[in-house]
Image (cartoon, rainbow, N blue to C red):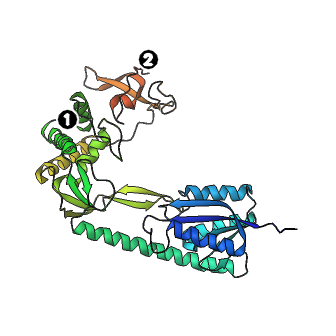
Amino acid sequence: MKKEKTKVYIYTRVSTAMQVDGYSLDAQKNRMKAFCDYNDYEIAGEYEDAGKSGKSTLDRVSFNRMMDDVRSNKDGVSYVLVFKLSRFGRNAADVLATLQVMQDYGVNLICVEDGIDSSKDAGKMMISVLSAVAEIERDNIRAQTMEGRVQKAREGKWNGGFAPYGYKLVEGKLDVNEEEAKCIRIIFDQFVNTEMGANGIAKYLENNGIRKMPRQNGKKELFTAELIRKILQNPVYCGKIAYGRRKTEKIHGTRNEYHMVKQEEYLLYEGIHEALVSEDTWERAQFKILSQAKKYEKVSKPKDEKIHLLSGIVVYPICGSGMYGNKVIKRTKDGSWEKVLCFYGCKHRQLTRGDKCNYRTPFLQKCS
């Protein structure tokens, strides 16, 4: 009677920082397929995450799909094969926790290049040691990458990613995109030389038929107030290269969840690209932004302030956007403010998201 082959999954991953040096997806696959042929293993599934960091398993779609298949015993596999342990993960806690889940379902891990098999006595101990080393290595790679980016900023070079609106990337350098640059100059001119704020400028651009050019990181045609604020605060438009304007910080109370936090202080260097506005114009814009922020400083709501319970739950039939609570107020004879009408409105009507909804609110209610 012919012996049934041992079934395995193979998993491959490359990060955005490491695409070469023998770790390419094809190199990993070829090595593991040769290993399977030699050991007479049957590959029941292939899973691949391209451009994904090893610091966490949360955003690795294929990895999580593979783990779901392990839990469901979909293919009856005995092993998950990876090229090296660092391809499985670079966070020691994640690696060990995931391995424990796999073993709970009778599936072990084989790291082909490292010669590790978690079903063997010494395998799990080696995984514990190497996963800790991989985590240290990840931190070192991150530190080296950050230092390289700082050096590029010192040299006035663009640090990667999409070019800011108004520019285009030519061989890694920012060149002016004249068609887009016109809008940038109009935005700064209107903000600095008129009483208009970001919302007013968004309406001004729409009313004058000025549209945003669709591009990789923005397909909507209308300029939003949020985008205009970002443009006004970006020093790249006065010929500077900033580093550290935002910082990735771990969310308190979580293990592998992070978010971007805006920094009040950051490094600023002279860029080698052409400025779209003068330094004086940019500084005047920053002064106005700070003045407006102070003018509209948030205050605590009174304890008896009514809460709009249906905000975000009720949606508009045209754009599908969630309705939000709002109110109309007027000044009384004694100079105080009085709430007159309470209603639910659509943010898209105010162009805050780049769309304009033409659905009119069907009801208004007197504030009690």
Q: Nearer the viewer, residue 272 or 48?
A: 48
The disc label shown at residue 34, or none: none
Position of 236 with respect to 278 (left or right) is right
The disc label shown at residue 196, or none: 1
Quadrant of res 240: bottom left
Image quadrant in which the C terminus is located: top left
Image quadrant in which the N terminus is located: bottom right
Is mark 1 in CB contact (under 8 Å) with mark 2?
A: no
Figure disc tally: 2
The percent coordinates of residue 273 (x first, y second) are 18, 58
The percent coordinates of residue 29 (x first, y second) are 57, 67
Position of 111 with respect to 27 (left or right) is right
Q: Nearer the viewer, residue 250 or 224?
A: 224
Identify the residue at horizontal 28%, vertical 26% (top origin): 336
Where is mark 2, residue-wise?
Answer: 362
What residue occupies the far right of the structure in this picture? 1
Q: Is residue 299 visible?
A: yes
Disc 2 is placed on an element classified as: loop
Q: Mark 1 or mark 2, which has the lower sequence index?
A: 1
Mark 2, residues whose alpha carbon is within 10 Å: few (<14), some, or many (≥20)?
few
Position of 129 with respect to 358 (left or right) is right
The residue type indicated by label 2 comes to Pro
Disc 1 is placed on an element classified as: loop
Position of 260 with respect to 113 (left or right) is left
Q: Is residue 118 visible?
A: no
Quadrant of res 99: bottom right
Mark 1, residues whose alpha carbon is within 10 Å: few (<14), some, or many (≥20)?
some
- The Cα–Cα distance between marks 1 and 2, rounded to whole angstroms, is 30 Å
The residue type indicated by label 1 comes to Met
Q: Nearer the viewer, residue 46 or 285?
A: 46
Q: Nearer the viewer, residue 367 or 121?
A: 121
Quadrant of res 329: top left
